[in-house]
Image: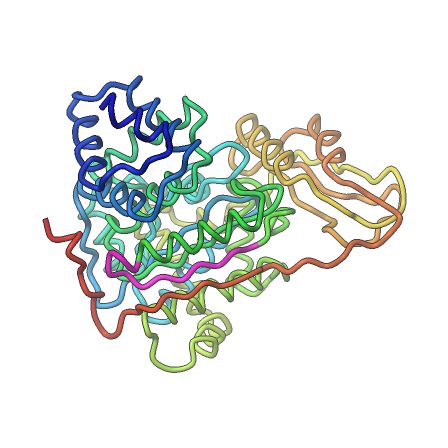
Amino acid sequence: MRRAIARKRDGFALDPSQWRSIVSAYLAGGVDDAQMAALLMASLCRGLNEDETLALTDAFVASGETLRPPGARVVDKHSSGGVGDSTSLIVVPWVAACGVVVAKLSGRALGHTGGTLDKMEAVEGVRTELEPHEFFVCLERAGCAIAAQSARLVPADKRIYALRDRTATVPSLGLIAASIASKKIAGGAHAIVYDVKTGRGALLPRFDQARRLAETLVELSERFGRGATALVSDMDEPLGPSIGTGLEVCEARDFLRGRRRDPRLETLCFALAEAMLRVVSFPGDARAALRRALAGGAAAERFEAMLRAQGALPGALERLAPHAVAADAHATGAGFVHGIDAVSLGETARTAVDRAGPRAGVFLRKRIGDPVQAGEPLATVYGDAALAPAIGHAFDIQAREPAKRPVIYVEIGSRATVAGGSAARSTLETK
């Protein structure tokens, strides 16, 4: 291990067999935290090449069990983390309403970013900590499920991720890619769509970093016989207007029912849902099928069926509404919204939820590019009126109108898709 650390420190690559041995020894106690931390820091500073990233991903997958969800065409979706991002709550049942099984393994809030599991649990009675057989029952009943990663899936990644968090070695592209891809591969979906965020509110703020991560995730998925597509999307401001666990569930509910659809959120949801259908070789016009599922109410019905299958109490979704305590943050001058600090708003919404429960959070009244008059409300905070000044400080108002930015910067497609059955298994999976 000492020689491996020194070799990586000096800028050389480790052999795939070395990575597998190191991960296995770390789980067994033969490599301690200090040694692994040193190797992670060397990997952050020197980077991992393609073969090393593949070997580390393979070692993570091999450290635990691999699920085999029911269905000939099963798709999963992953986001690298954002603010006001309720896309998973929307696209999972939406795609399932088109006849494709969606087995979504999600995580909890991390820093300023929202956690899909926390949002699901804002609906009274919903369980996300499911054993594999319970997860499969939900898939069979509703055609989709959003659940936590089982402790038996990629346990090596779980331990190493915790160490990365403690040692400030999270922002390594190779380590990020191996961590994300291994969980998706072990989750058993035949195809995966990745949503990689870029901008001031993203894990990787620079576009070149986000694009490279997206490319790496697609390449890794292909090497494991999975079809994959990655979108690089904007996180310079919150994606949707609702920020907070319960508020984002309300956003998804109202979107699926046709009550309110924020344009930025709608653009990304359509793109992700269409990519999820294409990557499993959906027969026919994917966009037309999605429009029918939305207009006919099938997507909203599937959302409710998923919540019921995961334990939602009768009427819980209907009862979910913004907290009664509300306060607006007002503009101090006139002009155009030039910037919105997504990190600050994400942290403020999380504080509100911690203090007042899942119905608390932030709702944006203005977005980047909107004209503003002095005294106009910029946003509303629910649950704790004392947080209103912090929300106002998150808005940058200037005299000139800002340049428009796209919601989606690029889509990176896979050469492999699933056609009527499971994707071909790679030799890496047969151990």
Judged from this view, the residue extending furthest toward the left is 431
Q: Position of residue 52 (x, y in %)?
A: 29, 43
> Is residue 229 in the magenta section?
yes
On screen, residue 168 versus residue 310, left or right, reads right
Give the residues in magenta: 222-233
Q: Position of residue 129 (x, y in %)?
A: 29, 39
Q: Residue at x 35, y 49 (%)?
A: 146
- For the point 32% across and 44% down, the residue is 53
In the picture provided, is 267 more to the left or to the right than 100?
right
Judging depth in this view, the residue of 264 and 339 nearest the camera is 339
Front-lying residue, 137 or 271:
271
* Residue in view at x 36 percent, y 29 percent: 10
- Foreground pick, 270 / 233: 233
Give the answer, above or below, for where 381 lies relative to 400: above
Left or right: 216, with 33 as reference point = right
Q: Can you give x and y, in whole percent of width and height, for residue 418 in the image?
A: 27, 69
78 inside magenta stretch:
no
Q: Position of residue 216 (x, y in %)?
A: 39, 52
Q: Residue furthest bottom?
A: 284
Given residues 424 and 427, the one toward you in this image is 427
Q: Quadrant of the N terminus?
A: top left
Q: Is residue 273 above or below residue 330?
A: below
Q: How is the image coloured?
A: rainbow
Q: Residue at x 46, y 50 (%)?
A: 317
Residue 208 in the image: above or below residue 95: above
